[in-house]
Amino acid sequence: MTDGGTTRKLAPIEGRVDARLTDLRRLMAEEPADPDIVAEARKRKESALLDFGIAQSSVASWLYAKCHHHIPTTAVPTAAVLATGDGSRALLYNPHFFLELDQEGVKFVLFHEARHLMHRHLYVDEELRSDPRFTLAAEVAINHVALLRLRRDSLPTIPGKDGGPPEPTGIDPRKIHAMYEEDLRKQGLQPLPYDEFCYTDLTVYGELRRMKSLEPPPMAYCVHGDDDEIPLDPETVEQVADEVLREVVQAALRGNQSAREEVLNLADRSADGGERIQRMWGGLGLEKLRGVTPVTRRVEWWQRWLVDVLASKLEDAERLVYPKKHGAILLALGHDPMLTRRGPERKKVVLIALDTSGSMPDAVISWLTTLVGQTDGVESHWLSFDGVVMPFVPGERVLGGGGTNFQNVVDYAEGRLEVAGKRLMVEPDAIIMVTDGYARKVSPAEPDKWIWLITDNGDDWPDRHHPPMACHRVTSSG
């Protein structure tokens, strides 16, 4: 695009973080180009966002709705999302650049920048993001998804300099794969085919790390792909990304097929990103969207889950009493009476019952023993059970093997059944059941107190109880 037919307007950013980018008021007030150019660029941007909202990208549509300002500016050479520490969010776009693209090209660039913010949210590890190979992997992964989602065969292009051939706007994932294939074959290694190479974002990164020689190509058309020159405050990114993903998941749950496809694709592509990412998706309700029960998903952090659930049931009680004499004096003086705390707090009671008819992982029992033993103010009661309930001492071998009866444990916990000639004389604050789940279902009087740890290949029926009981799978490795 030319201004007056002579000057190319792809102004580079001056300095690492242009001071203009931290002053949104100044950016909004600047006149970056001829009003007709700005108006046409804005029209293309609005049309792209409309297409996103209708069918193509719910994530991009919601993200740009969260950007409080859309600012045409020559402070960026192409386009970028800005997120500052004061919570400001803005889409910055160079109107000259947008007019060098066709309408579909504008969509591609906006999709790319939206996906960059999601990458920043998902892969927060600074060491990872500072690796040039991960930077390149992000470009490859984002453009691969953009080509698929926007149904393109190739990257958008802009006119070449000085009448030269058109220039692609970004990193071509197939060209990077070709470089990767050539490098690995020279090493005598077997490269992955393209689809497997791009299977997840971290697959791309892992495969690029196998390369012996890699010179990342310049990323002239992606501001965020080159040294993070545009501010992306981590807390603001986390906030906006969480808001966007939550709303997209909710739209998917309401039946929006486009939102469902996109959010499941994004989740699948980040599936090998570690515990934090999987917890994030679990918290957003992804398992419900997949038709999977979230509280019983088999994961390796069941210990953390149990600590959190148990803590919620063992919150310190506040014994508050009304001091009659002191209260009468306060009333006589015209003051409101105050409640005071008196006496020692009673210990919390945890009942742990182990199903001896199923496969009881030793590591699970050992870890439970440690957990309860290290929890302050807890009085623990241990049982083993199959068809009958038996006392159990941690460290002893679990014996049994007959039929299983959960109702006997319920009766003992609720004070109706004697074990070894004694009833439970205290009221449990929490009951932990370690079992394979295969027995007649029960309905305790206070289901919110019950925590079910379901062993390998067990039945997670407690989660389907009404109301649901806390329920999680444990792994045989503990």
Image: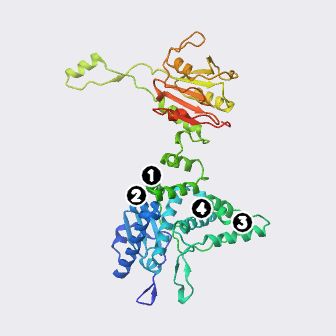
Binning the other alpha carbons within 10 Å of mark 4 as few (below 14), some (14 to 19) or many (20 upward) gives few
Which residue does the numbered mark 4 point to in the structure image?
130
Callout 2, which amino acid?
A: Gly
Callout 1, which amino acid?
A: Arg
Callout 3, which amino acid?
A: Met
Q: Residue 211, labelled with which disc?
A: 3
Image quadrant for the C terminus? top right
- Mark 1 lies on a secondary structure that is helix
Of the image marks 2 and 4, the number of the one nearer the N terminus: 2
Proximity of marks 4 and 3: CB atoms separated by less than 8 Å:
no
Place residue 99 in its image quadrant.
Answer: bottom left
Which residue does the numbered mark 2 point to in the structure image?
87
- Mark 2 lies on a secondary structure that is loop
Q: Nearer the viewer, residue 238 or 196?
A: 196
Q: Nearer the viewer, residue 88 or 291?
A: 291
Of the image marks 1 and 3, the number of the one nearer the N terminus: 3
Q: Residue 375, labelled with which disc?
A: none
Place residue 248 in its image quadrant.
Answer: bottom left
| Closer mark to the observer between disc 2 and disc 3 | 3
| Spatial separation of the CA atoms under disc 1 and disc 3 | 37 Å
